[in-house]
Amino acid sequence: MAEAEPVLTPGIEPKNGDAHDLPSSPGVTATWGSKGANMSSISNSEWNDAEANKLPEKVADLDRKGELPENEKKDRKRIVVVGLGMVGIAFIEKLMKYDVKRREYDIIVIGEEPHLAYNRVGLTSFFQHRLVENLYLNPKEWYSAMPEGSLNYHLNTLVTEINSQDKTVKTSAGDTVPYDILVLATGSDALLPRHTPGYDANGVFVYRTIDDLQRLIDFASTRKGTTGAVVGGGLLGLEAAKAMMDLEDFGQVKLIERNRWVLSRQLDSDAGGMVVEQVQSLGLDVLLSKRVGKILTDEGNNVKGVIFEDGEEMQCSCICFAIGIKARDEVARKAGIRCADRGGGIVVAPDLSTSIPDIYAVGECASWENQTFGLIAPGVEMADVLAFNLTQAKAHAPRKFKRPDLSTKLKLLGVEVASFGDFFADRDGPKDMPGRRGAVKKDEANGKTDRVKSLTDGPAPPPVKALTYKDPFQQVYKKYLFTMDGKYLLGGMMIGDTKDYVKLVPLVKNQKQLEMQPSELIIGAQKGDDDGDDLEDDTQICSCHNVTKGDVVKAVKDGTCKSIGDVKSCTKAGTGCGGCMPLVQTIFNKTMSSMGQEVKNHLCPHFEYSRADLFNIIFVKKLTEFAQVMKECGKDPESTGCEACKPTVGSIVASLFNKHILDDTRRGLQETNDRFLANIQRNGTFSVIPRVAGGEITPERLIIIGMVAKKYKLYCKITGGQRIDMFGARKQDLPAIWQELVDGGMESGHAYAKSLRTVKSCVGTTWCRYGIGDSVGMAIRLEERYKSLRAPHKIKGGVSGCVRECAEAQNKDFGLIATEKGFNLFVGGNGGAKPRHSELLAKDVPPDDIIPILDRYLSFYIRTADKLQRTARWIENLPGGIKYLQEVILEDKLGICAELEKQMEILVESYSCEWTEVLKSPAKKALFSQFANTDESINDTIEPTQERGQERPSYWPKDSITEDFRNHKWSELSWQPLIKAEEFRDLPTGDSRAIKRGDTQLAIFKVRGKWYCTQQMCPHKRAFVLSDGMIGDDIKNNKLWVSCPYHKRNYELGGEDAGRCANDESVNIATFPIEERDDGNVYVKLPSVEELDSVLGTAKFKIKKSDTTDPFESLDRKLKLALGKGRKGTVVSHLEGGLGEKEKAAMILAGGERGVGGLDW
């Protein structure tokens, strides 16, 4: 971006950085500051758009990366903004923020005053510092830091004419400036009572601009010791009175108000009266119920006093009127733009458009539903609506300007004052009743209102109840207005104590039903007894291993366990499904704290680091292999690790470097689901879930999925995440199934991984008549971006198109709910064993800004969460919770947001479909054979049950197999060559294969050059899966084990205890001598095939339907399922003579639906 040069000659179309002066006003020329200036000088930032404050840094960063869009100037539209006030600059800030990555617009702003946009709300402070630069909303450097050509301004220039036919405006400098879009932000003028005699005397002022204040300052210095008066007891009047008192030139300052109390537009008589008492105590003389009838002047037309309408006279030398404003609409009227007849103002539609195309109006000059607004907040809201619609409405429903929130909170003459919501609902009746929109009383609907009754009894009182608190000693007043049932807060006002303002305003705006008694909002909740730990010692906290709270507490208190890794090793709590880990961690932490001990969050006995610590070490040192991590960070560099640390390291490496998880050095780190890229099921088969981004699927893909399911006889079910799950896939069939799905344009859904699962969506504006956001489009974009992203735990998202929340986004790890302004972004929700409602991270986020925020949030979670910790528990454990997360993610408290976004970008760019990579690699495909020594297979270790037209495995028996396999006495053993040694690799994590001999399945392991052989079946659930289990070790105690992938029963592989289950003494396994010989074969010492099958044969332990009980047998008898009214069989048609699903599908597949050629697409 080139440096901008100041231009001193008026009358030239402005380039970037040019400024124009009126010829009659020499010397007031705006110039650009150096881009190297210190941007920390930004003042009045509370009135800026927070993101706009950071635009200079963002622009510089995009420029450095070469990411600034390079749209040709001819492709960009020109927006001319008339007015550089607070609303004008608000529109510019928001448009620049939305457009910085698009560059669809160039902006020219024309300001009438000789100053850049300044804080008109803070005018009073000018009396102290007298420096207009201190009021600037953005310093000069901010304007010049924008992309070249995107922002230009004229100062000290009045727009005199609009030509809507030619789309140009003319200025007082003689310039003609063309526009594509014209935005009028001309503001308003302060009212002067021109009907009052003497209104034009010397010493009469208004309180509106810097020039007004400067004239008042200069005049006051010539009237020292006299009386100054302010007419108008509203917000501006009190500000003006304070300013005149701060000048210390006047001997006395008097406030004249025509009503019986001040701030009558914000407060009732009680509250206004209390304010009067407080400001009088500060030295301001307040005259109530007074109207100025005439201004008295001397021969030189100088103010010398006033006569009130009641005849009373008052001496004064200066009068400042603060009695209201009038919209500046003269240039619009002249151009034929429709303006309001009463009260003035440019008439605007809900989208802020005027009666002429491509011309809009915002701020105090705009008349919306015959109202103009003198507060800054409605103007900023208008600016936001218009900027949003010009940039974001292509991907979102256009926004409309609605009834603004007129809540105000300020400090006047040292008095805290606030009003919020519908604060006069008890006087004027409520504008809106929560929960009863559109409700009409029956009598009113029928036109049968009793007119006589209404005339005799008067109008019915408003359906509102007021709760009032008044403390004359502390000068505190609060009045809150509620619906009659006390369930909704409508509005209120506060004097003296306004700290609850920020909490109450959202309750009103969101029309949220109260979860407490109304009185609690003023006096607080009655505090009860503190809750103790409500779990008894015999409460089961880990169902996988039947571990109680008392087991964990005892292991910690007797000194056995000094870290969470020790707890997992000793008690096995958390080593099954992992769902109990947050609770186990909490119990451990509290027990340690109660003993005065330091809580160690070590990963496991192999690492004296937490997961977050380990992540940072791996990240900084760029460690990509488990052996490197163990060498750098492990307690024993030669260790194989265990079932706790291996998946964690594997997840961290995948989160950082996104290498394929089945590469040789990484496969041994994966749990069984990841190892086979599918979810293992009860019978040893797997489920396959292709990705269905956002829940959107084409008929063609449905056909492909249906054909695959038919071909491989897979049980089908729709998941909670809007996908189709196909169950019963055999390990050896997985590559063939993936081949058909990938060939049809599908890819892995990562349902097996601790990664992004789904982003659920409703249909939003795609179809729904209530939708205000394209929830499907957003969900697909998010799922496509974050697919395959690995994390400490699974991640689920949701996007709802409106507040009806059909996608249930508020119980997801991240969820979006469309609002008129964009999306509300929620985080940290989950279902599961301990459900948690998500919390609001950011409100009204434009579609363009969703990705950067989520990039930061997910990257920060991946970096800092503990192992197997969902986002819900993670946020709960963050210091400061959601507030701290907002500071880190939205405010960049740690200065790492750019790094977090960069980290996510690297992961996104390195995506590949894991199924596809397997299909490309013969070596990886070979890993999916059922047995390493034969192509034969053994199927259906659990007898199938026919149910509702599909097959599922029969239920598990209640009891485990407790046969003593470990100590079985074999009649005779002999060495048998079973497999080539070259089938195994020497990996730091170990290697394993399943072997078939007769009807018996065996598992062979190779760990650090040593061989081990066991039976393949885990007796706990008769699951033939041990070769797929994780290998762990404890070198110090010379222990090596395999952990069953189902429920983490850990069986020792060698030594005196070989075959023993370390965490379930009721079960054990057989082990066999094994060795590698010079002929390249691996030999195992086994009994005969017949004897081996008689003890360990698969058929012997096949689970049969007759071994189990049907849990619905009794219920079905009660329901009489087959005869129940309105019920039908699952394969029968409701139509008389209908074919039913099987015959209909068979006819379609045979080509009978549309003739011999099949379906007519």
Image (cartoon, helix red, strand yellow):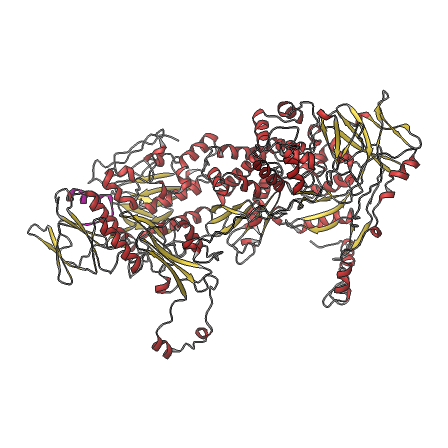
Could you say where residue 722 lies in the image, as x and y percent from the top left? 64, 50
Using the rendered view, name the quadrant where residue 975 is placed: top right
Q: In this view, does 524 lie to the left or right of 806?
A: left
Task: Decide whether residue 489 is among the magenta residues.
Answer: no
Q: Is residue 775 left or right of residue 10?
A: right
Looking at the picture, does residue 166 appear above or below residue 43?
Answer: below
Looking at the picture, does residue 560 appear above or below residue 333?
Answer: above
Residue 394 visible, this orientation: no
Pick out the residue farthest to the left.
Answer: 299
Of 72 and 1016, nearer the camera is 1016
Residue drawn where x is 32% and y is 38% of the image:
14
Pick out the residue farthest to the top.
Answer: 1078
Q: In this view, does 120 lie to the left or right of 99?
A: left
Could you say where residue 752 lies in the image, as x and y percent from the top left? 68, 41
Task: Decide whether residue 211 is among the magenta residues.
Answer: yes
Pick out the residue farthest to the bottom.
Answer: 452
Residue 639 visible, this orientation: yes
Could you say where residue 783 lies in the image, as x and y percent from the top left? 59, 43
Could you say where residue 247 lies in the image, as x and y percent from the top left? 19, 43
Quadrant including the N terminus: top left
Using the rendered view, name the quadrant where residue 660 is placed: top right
Q: In this view, does 174 lie to the left or right of 523?
A: left
Of 909 and 40, nearer the camera is 40
Using the rendered view, name the quadrant where residue 865 is placed: top right
The magenta segment is: 205-218
